[in-house]
Image (cartoon, rainbow, N blue to C red):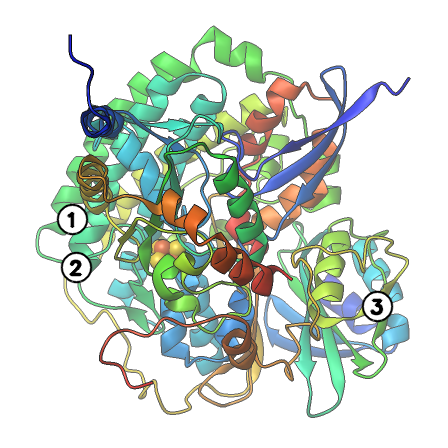
Amino acid sequence: MMGVVDKIKELDGAKITIQRENRIFVDVDKDRVIGTLYSLKLMGFHQLSVQNVVDRIKDGKFEIFYVLYSHEYKINVIVRTWVDRDNPVIETADKIYPSAHTWEREISEMFGIKVEGNEDCGKPFILENWKDIPPMRKDFDSVKYSSEHFVFRHSEGENE
Amino acid sequence: MERMTEEQVKTIANMLRKRSLWMIHYCTGCGAMELPPTMTSRYDMERFGLAPYVTSRQADILLITGYLNVKTLRRVITVYEQMLDPKYVIGFGSCALNGGVYWDSYAVIKQLDRYIPADLYIAGCMPRPEAIISAFRHLMELIDSGKADGYKRYKRNLAYYKENQRKVLG
Amino acid sequence: MNKSYELFIGPNHPGIPGNFSLKIELEGDTVVSAKGDPGYLHRAFEKAMEGRYYIQNLALIPRICVPEPDINEAAYAMAVEDLMGVEIPERAKYIRTIVLELARVANYTMWLGGLAGTLGLYTLAQWSIGDRDYALDLFSDICGARVYHMYIWPGGVRRDLTPGWEDSVLSYIRYLKNRLIDYDNIFLKNVMFKYRTKGIAVVTKEQAIEWGATGPILKAAGVAQDVRKDDPYAAYEYLDFEIPTLTDGDSWSRAMIRRWELENSLNMIEQAIKKMPKKGPVCAKMPNPLKGYVPEGETYAKVESARGEHGFYMVSDGTGKPYRVAVRGASHTHMFTIAEKVLVGQRLADVSHTLVSLDICPPEIDR
Ligand code: SF4
């Protein structure tokens, strides 16, 4: 059990935070993330549970996280990396984790992040005919959009 | 034998129509979860002459079971236009009525009846099978008295509906 | 001459599990390629949750997965508790376990009906969905709602059980256990069922691990993985249960695994009712929910749903609203990574049954 944690600690250029005995955060640079994922997969972290993005608008960054899980060690490793908000480009992980393919499609649609090497990114996935900025970004105002595009029903007696 | 007047034909047609309603099998939202119990042994809506049906050409009722997002709305309109007259629309739950819990969502439409005419709404989130059955009974009454005329309204106000649809669908 | 043709299945199609569409390419009646087309149920949950207080989100989250809403509540509550460092009372743990298992029972009975329906046996669908309804009655006894309960919430559960509820649960379990024998006789032991499902939609052990499968797909392929065992939440660590596994990984094995799990769940509820402390608080003391109360941080909370691992990744910035919530539904991986590959080579008649067998739940994909 201890062995794998030590191995994770030795990953190149990674900042390790052990939040709980079975939950480890690994923060890496953007360039290292594919290599880190690959080494983690070799260690036995076979399952990519979720890959998604947090919009850190104050820092001008997108935080991309990969939640990995290992059947053997029963540990969750969460790999995090940051890219610039102005020019968000990441590299695809679908050669390592096949399920990343669809997560990346979702990310690229919802956040407008370009994923290099994933040919399906950029095609419409969940949304259809979307013309505004990518909706999951923090500067997209959902309430404003919906009141501009849809008409609300007002019940009788309500002040308009 | 005397020929029947048009009025009488209509009365008889309506009476027969209300006894055999086929609803199209399209679950647009989470309200569809209460349909299986309504269809199966416990609540058994077949005793009212209602049955699910698969194709839009043969169906009489279109159930909008809950929220409609813009992508589904496009399909729903196609399905609605494929259906043959007379056709009836029931809006399920508060989402079809006014957006419900998704009032601030960028994807979900509010107010179903701006896009297709609804004959009836069921309140609740989600409506219980009892409410669904009572809505069907109510729809039968409306059909009997000739008040369920959504399809006529759609034809009459086609420009209005098309304009609204174009606005959201782009 | 072009031999292959394209076929759209759904979104308006009785064989599709919910509002989802599938674009398949066929040659004769063999599937050459399959592509899922999601988005019909997209309601922007993750966006909406950022705009509401933690307590308001309770009304939203059960709607992420319709057939089994309680797992969302549990995962969400666990994430919030984890950020706040709250330990929930003992009795609340047991109540959560009972509710979650009951939800699993409701899901599996419905699923059995769905599977039988896609294979053309509607009798079982009539039976099992009717039986599921009695479980919904039990839910409506404790929280007033049949489908969306909003019963599990951060700190424990919303209110105590109604008096005598345990007895009605036990009598329901007794009833359902007898019914399961009938289900077996009419459906699972039926030779036609075997012919239709043996060797169909095989996911081998290597494939399941490589593609990141969870839940019954993984168990049917021979890996005993279950969040309830590996990372116990609620009261699962006090209960005695086994994870069923089979080795074939075909549609038949998955049906058997679910049948086993159904019985397991019933046994677990019985155990939990026996072991549950009879008195005590059901909710930890929590601060005022409308004033910012969740400390900064991020966490990943996961539970075992009927389909696999269901998780919430939650980021809090210390205000009263979550900064970001990302939902992991098991169907996301199961549809796009597994079903799209497994469907290739199937006959058209098996497509809808394969989707049900992999238990694809579209609301979980679209969110
Ligand atoms: S009204 Fe409620 S149950 Fe119906 S679709 Fe909306 S959220 Fe779902």
Kindly identify which residue carries mark 3: A114
Tell me the crowding category of disc 3: few under 14, some 14 to 19, or many 20 or more residues within 10 angstroms, Cα based: many
Beta carbon of the mark 3 residue lies under 8 A of ligand 1: no
Q: Tell me which image quadrant ligand 1 sits in.
A: bottom left
Spot occupied by residue A155 in the image (x, y as percentages of width and height): 28, 73
**In the image, is residue A33 above or below residue C168?**
below
Q: Amino acid at mark 1?
A: Glu
- For the C terminus of chain A, the image quarter is bottom left
Is the residue at mark 1 from the same chain as the one at mark 3?
Answer: no
Q: Position of B141 compared to C54: left or right?
A: left
Q: Amino acid at mark 3?
A: Lys
Spot occupied by residue C100 in the image (x, y as percentages of width and height): 35, 52
Q: Nearer the viewer, mark 2 or mark 3?
A: 3
Q: Secondary structure at mark 2?
A: loop
Q: Residue at horizontal 22%, vertical 44%? A: B135
Q: Secondary structure at mark 3?
A: strand
**In the image, is residue C22 above or below residue A154?**
above
Front residue of C303/C364: it is C364
Q: Secondary structure at mark 1?
A: helix
Specify the label residue C166 is tagged with: 1
Tell me the crowding category of disc 2: few under 14, some 14 to 19, or many 20 or more residues within 10 angstroms, Cα based: some
Report if the CB atoms under discs 2 and 3 are less than 8 Å apart: no
Is the residue at mark 2 from the same chain as the one at mark 1?
Answer: yes
Chain bearing tag 3 is A
Chain bearing tag 1 is C
**In the image, is residue C334 above or below residue C301?**
above
Kindly identify which residue carries mark 2: C161
Report if the CB atoms under discs 2 and 1 are less than 8 Å apart: yes
